[in-house]
Image (tube, rainbow, N blue to C red):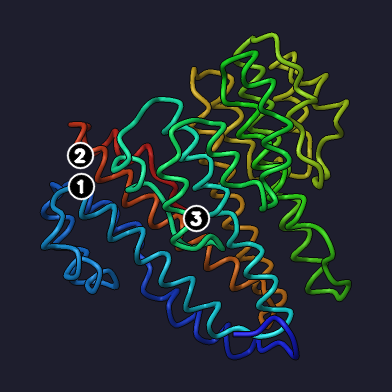
Amino acid sequence: MSAVGSSNPEYVVARVRARRGSLYGDEEYRKLTRMGPAEIARFMEESSYGAEINALGSRHGGVDLIEYALNRNLAEQFEGILDWSEGTLYDQIARYLRKFDAWNVKTVIRGVYTDADQSDVEVDLIRAGEFDDRRIRRLLEADSIDAVVEVLEDTIYGGPLRAAYAEYEETDVLVPLENAVDRAFYERLLSGLGNDEPTRQYEAFLKAEVDFRNAANALRLARSGADIDPAAYFIEGGELFTRGSLARLARNLDDLVEYIADSQYADELGPALRELEEADSLIAFEHATDAALLAYGDRLGTIHPVSVTPIISYILAKEREVENIRAIARGKEAGLSAEEIESELVIT
């Protein structure tokens, strides 16, 4: 793999499309919602997760086996894509996969905050980003938020986390730290992109992802009624909000919902917003944004079929598959009905 020289999107897109065909569909998800953890593991063994289930089956069982197999498969799938990629394409994909470094940082911070067992935190980590095993181990061994920040001092997250640490200490809530991680990731992701038409379309997709993240954060703050400055949690790079408009709209839920409903995302998010007006949860809205991003990526992939966009679209779809299977397994463990579990899934 190389980040210099010419790109090879034709080859990588062809390989990714072959993998896309093996992803679970709606019918498979519905079958899984009616199975117990052991049956889910056996079902996975007969699919693209077979190697992971067999390799881990002697050490883990039940939901733990499913979780470890999902995370290992995801990491190996994405490592394979990087191994195939060259030049600018490699750089674009590697940048996007750093989202899993951000995920792992936030997961470790939450684990420290709640005093969770190290094993419980580790099962939720996804080793598909840039962090090597040594850094992951050091993060897992950190026994305080300050120790986590120290482990990350030489990464893009170190400075932002150190700057947010004082507010965390003052408020004893994780929002400043988690938002610092997200902002660091998206600012690096959107910097220095190329200027050809496929890359501009890819940039539009990334901006939509930032918009949806800002919208979810704003809705969460509006719902909470907490005395928090929404502008402090604004992520640069999107087009839907400015820092000022986010701060203003997040103080009034009705105005915020109306603003999003009248935006360029009305078609994708309109139904979820109508549900949100009547519901007590943001889950429907967040699921709608996930589904909208999947659909947007697929659409751009047909416009520019030989570019990074179909690859990113596959990464999103694979990530969504893993999250859906994880939600099913955890729902079964918690004793939820098939109908309750299905409502937690993102299906397009």
N-term mark: 1 or 2? 1
SS category of the residue bearing label 2: helix
**Numbered label attached to residue 168:** none
Residue occupying image coordinates x 72% and y 56%: 206
Residue occupying image coordinates x 67% and y 74%: 308
Which residue is under mark 3? 135
Which residue is under mark 2? 332
What percent of the width, then of the height, locates residue 138? Answer: 46, 49
Answer few, some or many: residues within 10 Å of disc 3's Cα (few below 14, many 20 plus, some between 14 and 19): few
Which residue is under mark 1? 63
Task: Find residue 334 and report its image quarter.
Answer: top left
Amino acid under disc 1: Val
Q: Is residue 272 left or right of residue 9?
A: left
Numbered-mark total: 3
- Do the CB atoms of the residues marked 1 and 2 lie less than 8 Å apart? yes
Single out the mark in the foreground, 3 or 2: 3
Task: Find residue 142 and report its image quarter.
Answer: top left
Q: Is residue 169 above or below residue 46?
A: above
Q: Is residue 259 above or below residue 4?
A: above
Answer few, some or many: residues within 10 Å of disc 1's Cα (few below 14, many 20 plus, some between 14 and 19): many
Amino acid under disc 3: Arg
Amino acid under disc 2: Lys
Q: Is residue 39 left or right of residue 266?
A: left
